[in-house]
Structures are given as C-alpha cells and as structure tokens.
Image (spheres, rainbow, N blue to C red):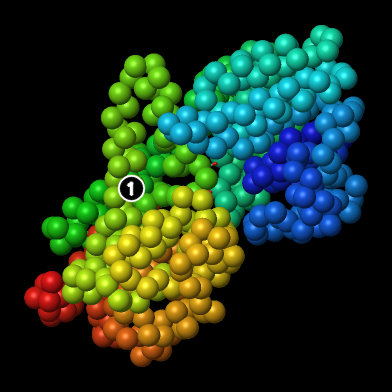
C-alpha cells in the first residue's frame, strides 16, 4: 500500500484520489476550499459524475480515502503528491497558473521527507521545470524531490472508466527513477506507459486535445459544405471512419465543442506558439469554426421562423456542454440563449441535471419541468445537448403541444424522414431535409 496525497479536489483531483484509493492505496485528498472538504466529509459530491459518489463512499468507509485542508497532514508520510488544481484561462488565452504556484509553494513549505511531485493539471510546456524551481526556492531546508508530469486524459461523464482503462499513461521527468516509481503506481491499469521528458509529456496533452478539437471543427466544416451540396454528413462520417488512418470517433458534427478542456487548451496552445513568434493558423481556424457553430444555430432558427425572432418562444432541449454531466463551462447553450434573447426571443430550457448550474449563468432563461412543458407553446425547439432521454420523446405529443412544429436539431438525434412524416418543420446539421415540399415553403417564407 502506497501513500498518496492529491492536491485539489476538482474533477481530475477527486477522480484521481478515489481511483487510486480503490486500487488499494492510502490517499489523502486536499483542497484549500474548506466548504468543499466539509461537504466531501459528509459524503456530498461537488460535481456530478456517474459512479463517483459510490466509489468515494466505499473507499472512505474502507479507510483508504480521507479529506483535509491541511498540507502538513496530507504530506505526512507520503511518497507521492499529485497536483490536480485548476488552470483557468487568463485574459489572453494563456493558462493561469496561480493555483499551481500556490500548491507548489505549500508543498515546499510542508514536506518533511523526499517526495515525488506529479503534475496532473494541464499546464503550459515548461511548467514542470518551473514547479521544480518554486519548490527548491521555498523549502525551509533542502529535502530531495522530483517532478513528474502525468497528464490526465479522462472525459467528464465517463471519468472513472476512462481513468481505470486509459489508452496510455504518459510520464515525463528528468528523473528516470521517479518516473519508474510513478509507472509502478499505474501498473494495475494495464495500459501502455510512455516515459519521456517533462516538456514532451506536457506537449502530448495539448497536442492530443488540439487534434481532437480539430477533428470536431473539421467535420463541422464538412457539415456546412454538405448542407450546400445535398450530402449527409452523418453518412460521410461513417464512410470516412472505416479508414483506420481516420477512425470513427470524434466525427460527430453538431454545435461544436465546449467544456473545461478543449476551448481552454486550444487557446493556450495557440498562445504558447504566438509567444514564441509562431502563427498557429490551424488552431485559429479550429477556434473560429467552433465559435461559428453557435451563431449558425441561431441563424437557422431565425430562418425557420420566417426571418424574425421578435416575440417568439424558443425552447432549448439540453443545456450542459455534453450529456451525462451538469457542467456548463463553455456550453454552446450559453451563447445560443444570449443571441436568441438579443434577437427578441423568449427563451426557455430543460436539462435533466444542468438546470441548477445553468440558471446562475442565464437568469433570463425560464427553466421547465420536463421536455413536454418546454414544448408547450414554443415556436421552436433547439436540440442543444444529445441526452439519451431526448431521443425517446413522444414526438407527436411534442408536436401537438408546440405553437409551431419547428425543431432545429443541433446534434442530429432525430431521423429527418420521420420528422418530416410527423409534420415537423425540421432541420439538422449537415443533412438534407427529407421534405422537399417543406423546404420550398420555408424558402418562400424567408
Ligand atoms: C476532453 C477530452 O476528451 C479528454 O481526453 C480531456 O482530458 C478533457 O477534454 P471532455 O471535455 O470531458 O474531455 O469531453 P469530450 O467527450 O471529449 O467532448 C468535448 C466536446 O466535444 C463536447 O462539447 C462534445 O459535445 C464535443 N464533441 C465531441 C463533438 O462535438 N463531436 C464529437 O465527435 C465529439
């Protein structure tokens, strides 16, 4: 049994702590937010993540997982300290490292024995070296330590299974012995382990996220072209995906990427390049295409409602940036609601779990009890998040409740032919409308 400290109980930190505890280690998770730690001690989760509450409860009960706000308690007798604090975007897109700096200083001031400091937060290339400097300069007396970069690739909504079944573990360090010890901790995960230098490990995380974001913007650009040329992007993606050089994943056209990672990381990578005098043209195109998705959604609905949003009631089906999470960070719903309201529309919404978080960000949006209450009296609905429960709606009931049967499906969850048969005025992303008649009426009314 190894003893591990995890600094920061946000998404990555809490999952890391609970998962390492479940693998049989003794884990002390620390956060400077006393309220958060108090709630965790009472068994209340600060985030919604399937399976997390049960995993935390089980490991706390078994005595392998505990929570504290005290660095001296967290570091007492520990060999490994994971840094998993937030790295929000600064004003110019650069990563704001103030929490990493504070954690490194506190580690330096409270460590009493040799320590391996492992950085899990997504940090600019070069941060590992900087953390090592901060620790060295803030120790009251020199105690040996090493810094290892171990970027986390988990996704919200499937965080536990992503953590437990990684496609690879990336470790970067100048100290091969320390990297080897961290590799041992990950052996039960049975994943390929790549050991490299600090900067390369940090870059692997940015390059991976930027590539995935580029894949999404690519398919969204293809969707725009499909719309003009009468092709179906869903089938194009399937046809492309069989080529192993392309692969089928992350080719879902829609309203673009949101969340806590892709927007921030693509911006930060571009910023790092620009600081060195480079012009990351592709990264800028990825971001611009993504921003356009949100404007496009509002424009489509405006067209479908005859060119004017004034006084129209528009319902958002889904608010979270993706299904199975209550996370509203960089969610397309925020910009879409704002643009609709600016255009004179009355906006309402329903989301299975993100409405509490969302209402703080969008006070002018009325939250509804369920999708049918949302449909009642609406002039149009926009599918913003592809929650499974929206795929199973009683669409005839939805149609009958709506003031006008207009649906803009921003996630391609419905079958265009069926929607046409049911009498909806329906448009999707990068797919031809199956109702030629409907299309011509629509064009006539614009
Ligand atoms: C992502 C990375 O996948 C993960 O490896 C990293 O550690 C953190 O960032 P996450 O933000 O949780 O994870 O969500 P993910 O499932 O990757 O989706 C990101 C966004 O892209 C969502 O807004 C989703 O709707 C969008 N997306 C994803 C698409 O629009 N199309 C796709 O084909 C895939």
Is 445 on the left or on the right of 430, as rendered? left
The answer to whether 175 is drawn above or below residue 189 in the figure is above
Locate the C terminus by quadrant: bottom left
Q: Classify 367 as above or below 257.
A: below
Quadrant where the image shows the N terminus? top right
172 shown above or below 299: above
Q: Residue at x 22, y 71 (%)?
A: 308
Direction from residue 443 to residue 119 in the image, left or right = right
User: Quadrant of residue 135 in the image?
Assistant: top right
Q: Residue at x 16, y 79 (%)?
A: 438
Asked whether the viewer can see residue 383, the reply is: yes
Q: Nearer the viewer, residue 207 or 297?
A: 297
For label 1, the crowd category at 10 Å Cα-Cα, with few meaning under 14, some 14 to 19 and many 20 or more, is: some
Residue at image point 19% right, 56% down? 226
Residue 217 x %, y %: 32, 45
Seen in the image, is 37 located left or right of residue 211? Answer: right
Residue 336's image quarter? Answer: bottom left
Q: Position of residue 106 (x, y in %)?
A: 77, 25
| Residue 164 visible in the current orientation | no
Residue under numbered circle 1: 291
Residue 436, percent from left and from top: 13, 76
Total number of numbered labels?
1
Residue at position x 18%, y 53% from top? Answer: 225
What is the residue that sits farthest to the top in this orientation? Answer: 142
Q: Secondary structure at mark 1?
A: helix
């Amino acid at each position: 049994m190894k003893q591990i400290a995890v600094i920061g109980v946000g998404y990555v930190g809490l999952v890391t702590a609970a998962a390492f505890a479940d693998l049989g280690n003794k884990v002390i998770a620390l956060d400077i937010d006393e309220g958060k730690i108090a709630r965790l001690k009472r068994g209340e989760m600060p985030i919604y993540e399937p399976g997390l509450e049960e995993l935390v409860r089980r490991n706390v009960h078994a005595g392998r997982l505990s929570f504290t706000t005290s660095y001296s308690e967290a570091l007492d007798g520990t060999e490994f300290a994971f840094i998993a604090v937030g790295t929000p975007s600064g004003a110019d897109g650069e990563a704001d490292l103030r929490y990493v700096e504070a954690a490194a200083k506190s580690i330096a001031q409270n460590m009493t024995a040799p320590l391996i400091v492992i950085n899990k937060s997504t940090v600019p290339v070069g941060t590992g070296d900087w953390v090592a400097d901060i620790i060295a300069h803030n120790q009251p007396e020199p105690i040996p330590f090493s810094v290892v970069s171990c970027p986390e690739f988990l996704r919200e909504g499937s965080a536990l299974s992503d953590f437990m079944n990684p496609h690879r573990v990336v470790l970067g360090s100048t100290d091969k012995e320390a990297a080897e010890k961290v590799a041992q901790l990950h052996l039960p995960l049975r994943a390929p382990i790549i050991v490299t230098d600090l900067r390369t490990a940090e870059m692997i995380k940015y390059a991976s996220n930027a590539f995935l974001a580029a894949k999404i913007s690519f398919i969204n650009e293809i969707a725009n072209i499909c719309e003009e040329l009468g092709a179906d992007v869903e089938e194009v993606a399937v046809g492309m995906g069989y080529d192993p050089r392309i692969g089928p994943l992350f080719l879902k056209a829609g309203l673009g990427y949101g969340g806590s990672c892709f927007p921030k990381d693509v911006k930060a990578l571009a910023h790092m390049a620009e600081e060195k005098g480079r012009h990351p043209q592709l990264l800028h195109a990825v971001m611009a295409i993504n921003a356009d998705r949100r404007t496009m959604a509002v424009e489509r609905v405006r067209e479908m409602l005859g060119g004017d949003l004034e006084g129209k009631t528009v319902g958002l089906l889904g608010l979270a940036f993706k299904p199975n999470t209550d996370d509203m960070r960089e969610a397309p719903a925020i910009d879409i609601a704002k643009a609709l309201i600016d255009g004179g529309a009355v906006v309402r919404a329903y989301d299975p779990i993100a409405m509490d978080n969302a209402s703080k960000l969008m006070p002018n949006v009325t939250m509804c009890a369920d999708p049918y209450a949302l449909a009642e009296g609406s002039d149009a609905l926009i599918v913003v998040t592809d929650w499974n429960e929206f795929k199973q709606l009683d669409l005839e009931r939805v149609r009958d409740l709506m003031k006008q049967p207009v649906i803009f499906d921003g996630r391609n969850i419905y079958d265009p032919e069926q929607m046409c048969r049911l009498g909806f005025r329906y448009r999707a992303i990068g797919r031809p409308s199956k109702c030629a008649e409907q299309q011509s009426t629509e064009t006539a009314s614009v």
